[in-house]
Image (spheres, helix red, strand yellow):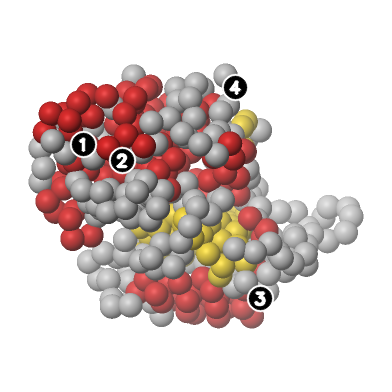
Amino acid sequence: MCSTRRIRYAAVVGLAVFLPGARSLRGQESPADVRYPATSDADSLTTALVGPPAPALYIPDRLERLVAQAESMRALTSLIISRRDSVLVERYYRGMRPSQAINVKSVSKTLLSPMVGIALRDGLLTGVDEPLSELLPDYYERLERGGSLDPRKRDIEVWHLLTMRTGIETTSFGNYGSWVASADWAYDQLRRPMICDPGACHEYSTGNTHLLSVILARQSGKSLRRYMLDELFLPLGIPLGEWDRDPQNRYLGGNNISLRPRDMLKFGQLYANGGRYRGEQLVPEEWIEESWRPTGRSPWNGHGYGYLWWMRRWGGERAYFAWGYGGQFIVVVPRLDLVIVTTSSLRDRERGHTRRMWSFFDRYAIPAFQIGWGAEAPDLRAW
């Protein structure tokens, strides 16, 4: 195992716009019955401070075009944009309410990424090179008894689950229906044929993240939901909404978690802030850096992939994003200290909406904020 891969750790509807009315979600508690007040004078940034003016947060004419473009997308239901924790745009469309939780689909996969980093920090996992055969020995015994233990499956590690490079046939896309109809989702993923050696190809699969769910639950001694709430989401003030379970009553790893857009924003801001929240390091910063290192590109869409994070350049900037079916996005642009959240209707989804979202980020959303706070220093690092 390459040493660079082995990681160990010691034990309201409308535009809520323009400054000075921008407000911060940092430190805002968010229990299930939270009420979000409208922006008040107490929330506003004062203009009476002594000293030089604050750097500009956005380019006004580009921000106007951004908002107009968002309004033209018939499937879009919410848009929130923040810089340095200040919410500059918050809009809801087509009956969506700020208090409403929606199914974020495969954004759920990215929510698992920090949990693996936390498990490593706390010694529940020894490293990303820990073999699945040691973490799930009972399943490997079943594979052997059933005659479906390809020897290459013994080489699969946690790293391969995080990067979608197990080499096992996917349980997503056309295989998803038969997978969720199976008696044991973890076993059904493991029993499927190998299409390449571990690490040799990118094969996006919800079954991979469900295996992570089983591993995290076993290692922590808690359900995945309880583990995520205790270690990360309750400290952030994020309640986890409705969530599917498998036939063994285990929470589905990597799909169908319900969140509110403002809670999606908090998760993005946590990563933009290097894993820190209210002065506490909730997620190891080293884990975030490792998660955002590209491990290859998807043959399906050409995007880069790290540890359950997608990545590509939009507007010339390095962007990292959680992506759920139909247009659910959490986009983090570290150089600009920028977080963009979108949700979209699955019922009223229009043809080409996802590609239109990519174009929206590239041509409108990110360029509107390429000013001030680091924007002057070009990002010349390649990928």
From the image, state whether disc 3 or disc 4 is nearer to you.
4
Q: Which mark is residue 149?
A: 1
Does residue 211 appear to the left or right of 146 in the view shown?
A: right
> Could you tell me residue 49's position as x and y percent?
83, 52
Residue placed under numbered mark 4 in the picture: 10
Residue placed under numbered mark 2 in the picture: 152
Q: First in sequence: mark 4 or mark 1?
A: 4
| Residue toward you, 35 or 127 | 127
Cα distance in 3D space between marks 4 and 2: 31 Å
Q: Residues within 10 Å of mark 1 (few under 14, many from 20)?
A: many
Q: Is residue 103 above or below residue 88?
A: above
Determine whether label 1 and label 2 are within 8 Å by CB: no
Cα distance in 3D space between marks 3 and 4: 46 Å
Q: Residues within 10 Å of mark 2 (few under 14, many from 20)?
A: some
Does residue 107 appear to the left or right of 251 in the view shown?
A: right
Q: First in sequence: mark 3 or mark 4?
A: 4
Q: Secondary structure at mark 4?
A: loop
> Could you tell me residue 196's position as x and y percent?
32, 52
Cα distance in 3D space between marks 1 and 2: 8 Å
| Residue toward you, 107 or 300 | 300
Residue placed under numbered mark 3 in the picture: 60
Q: First in sequence: mark 3 or mark 2?
A: 3
